[in-house]
Image (cartoon, helix red, strand yellow):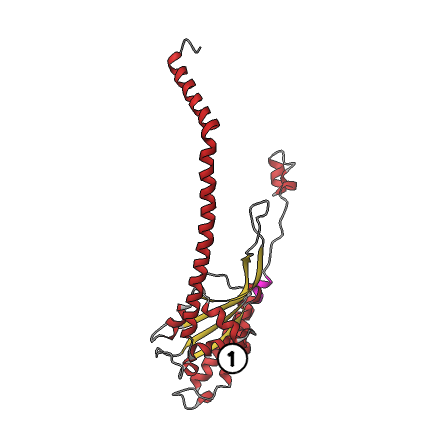
Amino acid sequence: TESKYHGPVGNLKTRSTELGSAVTGSSLTTVLPASSTVKNSIVLSSESRKELAKQAKVTKEERRGQIDGRHRYLISRLADGIDLSEQQVEEIIISDDKFQLIEQFFAPSGLKKLLFFYQDVLQQKSNASLKPDGSTNNLSQKKLFITMGSTEDFTGTCAFFLRTSDEVITASNVSQEVNFGMFDCTNGNILQGLEFFLSQIMIPALKSQQNWGAVKEGLKNSQIQEFLYAVDKFVSTLSSSRQNIEDKIQLAKVDIDIYVRNLQNPSDYITAG
């Protein structure tokens, strides 16, 4: 075959020989630079991580320098509500990627709300090793973080700050212009958390309210009474809806096969029907 098809086979044989000599003779010289490149990339990666950590530290200290009376007010409310120290809350806030949302909340005509979630979050261990299936060991722990409320699942506690006007928030007016509240949604039970928040916190607070602004009569005013009645009715509807959902009817699964297995003729189908 080699003599009959000398041209093609000869070329193939020559290429095979070249490939063989390349593998046996020069493969080591090509492997060494590759391993060296990997080693260099590891070093660069380590240097990059150090540089990122350095930049993060600088950013944290810059943010720490921006902390004033407004931030202190938020920090103290969060620390009281979540049972963390003010030092812990401060470190968490200045390390958060969404720190700029606080400044947007303080600005004139800024954000109407500022939300914090405090809940279990899966975090990968720094020295975690891969499992046989390629996954890693993740550790679940409580974490406080700033959120817009639309990208993360809500499964724990929400601490919120609400503006009462479009005025710029200053250290002198923050306690008057900003309201603070907490909303518990442990295990993702949002309806129950909302019902508790309204019935046990908001309604009692409203019914004990003495100053209703321009309404001088206060609780004796018919509009105020209608408003409180509407809130009570809403909470009652919410409660009944929640109970209906929790006690929902589930139809039992039926094994259809036992009914159709022995059907042979039209009369069997009629009987089964």
Q: Nearer the viewer, residue 41 or 223?
A: 41
Residue 239, image quadrant: bottom right
Q: Nearer the viewer, residue 17 or 62?
A: 17
**Which quadrant of the figure contains the N terminus?**
top left
Q: Residue furthest bottom?
A: 216
Q: Secondary structure at mark 1?
A: helix
The answer to whether residue 35 is magenta is no
In this rendering, does residue 243 appear at all?
yes
Image quarter of the C terminus: top right
Residue corresponding to mark 1: 203
Relative height, residue 265 to residue 72 (above, below): above
**Which amino acid type is shown beneath numbered disc 1?**
Ile
Segment colored magenta: 243-247
Magenta span: predominant SS is helix
Q: Is residue 32 above or below residue 231?
A: above
Q: Can I make out residue 148 in this image?
A: no
Q: Which residue is at a point 44% across and 55% down the rendered structure image? A: 48
> How far across and how far down the image is residue 246, in percent?
59, 63
Q: Nearer the viewer, residue 89 or 177?
A: 89
Number of callouts: 1
- On the picture, is 240 further left or further right than 170? right
Residue 100, horizontal then vertical, whole percent: 39, 68
Residue 223 pos. (x, y %):
42, 83
- Extreme top residue here? 4
